[in-house]
Amino acid sequence: MSEQNSGNSLRLSRRGLLQLGTAGILGKSLLSEPGPPTGATDVPRPHAPQYRFRVGASALNPDGPSVVAGIAIDGQYPGPEIRLREGSMLRVEVENTLPNEPTSIHWHGLLLPAAMDGVPDVSNFPIGPKRVFVYEYPLLQSGTYWYHSHWRLQEQIGMAGPFVIEARDEPLRVDHDVVVFLGDWLHRSPYAALQTLKENPKQLAAGARMANMKPDLADIQYDAFLLNGRASGNPWTYKARPGERIRLRIVNAAASTYFRLRLDGHPLTITHADGLMVEPVHVDHLQLGMAETYDAVVTLSASGSYTLHAVAIDGSGQAIGILHTPDATPKPNLEMPPFGGRALSYSDLRASVPTTLPQGPMRPFTLTLQGNMAKYLWTINGQAYPKADPLLISRGDRVQIELRNETAMWHPMHLHGHFFRVLQGAKERAPLKHTVSVAPHETVRIEFTADNPGRWFFHCHNLYHLDAGMARVFEYVL
Ligand code: C2O
Ligand code: CU
């Protein structure tokens, strides 16, 4: 009691001290007295979070009657849309209400301090059961991003949502600005699906396909594909007048599905790749690897209803959305669309400003992507994470990576905490991305400057490949 009193008195004003003295004389309990009014406003308080996420077990049924035991933020999939302005401070309080499972949130594509990156055992501790963690960092960029759990397979069962940072000076003029969030959905547990992959003869088939050099397009058979959390039976719809410009912020948040996307009867103008502006490209359709984002501007040409198709590249299904004019009722076109005409390719992407890196010591890496189908192990230079060496670099290095895909599958390779240049055609305007798709049996070159010290995950964004080892850590200190 006396220790506590003297502790308190240290922070009191002179008037407070006098009051304290009086209280002492009167022999009242100090603890039951209201505190002195002065000084209270001097106490610094943390700013309130803009978002509070409650992570918990949720019964989810985005595609109808099949209810799945998911894990979601505030019980919803996709998670709440974060929309903030460039230059502001992000503050998200995450409460893990799960009784016995950790969680985490990774802010995909964000340039943030490593300690806010949300990768258990790489940059952060996981958020334990019944624990709260506040993510807080300044937003140094603008664009279309997303967030997701980085704990095991939680992303597959509901832990993902869109994250939009509005530019301080937005050069793009549009009438509508809306997120298109793509996902894949299972009625069974993804852990069981992964176990089946480890034990099951699909491997033999995949191995045979690998020998024939035919691409192997999917590991997992999905029960549904989702657009803004809805399956094609009950699609997302959006209204705009003819002639209005609609900015679609497209995020491939699927766990292991590549999509091809097109809008019936309309070309798409690609304005941003992975959040950052590119010189506009007009295409009829585009392919998105997992974790890639593209912004596309469309203008409805005339009164009517137009279906936006996101077709899984193995052709096993599609998610749809419907853009329609106010006078037209939304009419889903459930036919699988053809993909003729012009497709977006990386060689079309030119950054809106030169992206050449500052001079720095060259640090070349050759990283070979391989798969051991008999064991369902996915490796980089023969090692499966976490039994893998860190990639040691130094601050200021110009890190050049040659990614050699020796497998029959696509691998969307993602680097945390940095953008890299994709070295394919555009020279000084090479686009900056955080995720690069490496086609079966192809080689891609990327480079980045090591300017954000820490331990940074570099991995395949196929959740099953990641869980089965296709990851490394780039590591450097101040
Ligand atoms: Cu979306 Cu480790 O990433
Ligand atoms: Cu992969």
Image (spheres, helix red, strand yellow):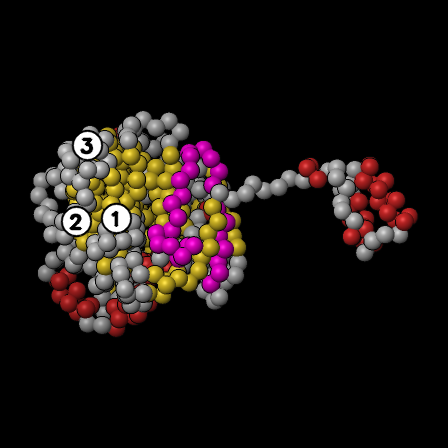
Horizontal side of residue 14 vs 156, given as left or right: right
In the image, farthest residue toward the front: 327
* Mark found first going from the N terminus, 1 or 2: 1
How much space separates mark 3 and mark 1, taking CA atoms? Answer: 19 Å
The residue shown at (36%, 49%) is 161
In the image, residue 173 sits, relative to residue 199, either above or below, namely: above
Q: Which amino acid does label 1 sit on?
A: Trp
Residue 377 seen in the figure = no
Residue 141: x percent and y percent?
Answer: 39, 35
In this view of the protein, can residue 87 be seen by the observer?
yes
Q: In which quarter of the image is residue 465?
A: bottom left
Say what amino acid the circle numbered 3 marks. Answer: Pro
Q: Is residue 197 above or below residue 7?
A: below
Magenta stretch in the rendered image: 72-98
Q: Is label 1 in a helix, a strand or a loop? A: strand
- The local crowd at label 2, few if under 14, some if 14 to 19, many if 20 or more residues have their Cα within 10 Å, is many
User: What's the mark number on residue 236?
Assistant: 1
Residue at (42%, 34%) from the top-left corner? 85
Label 2 within 8 A of ligand 1 by Cβ: no
Q: Give the residue at x 21% y 41%.
A: 323
Q: Name the residue under label 2.
A: 332
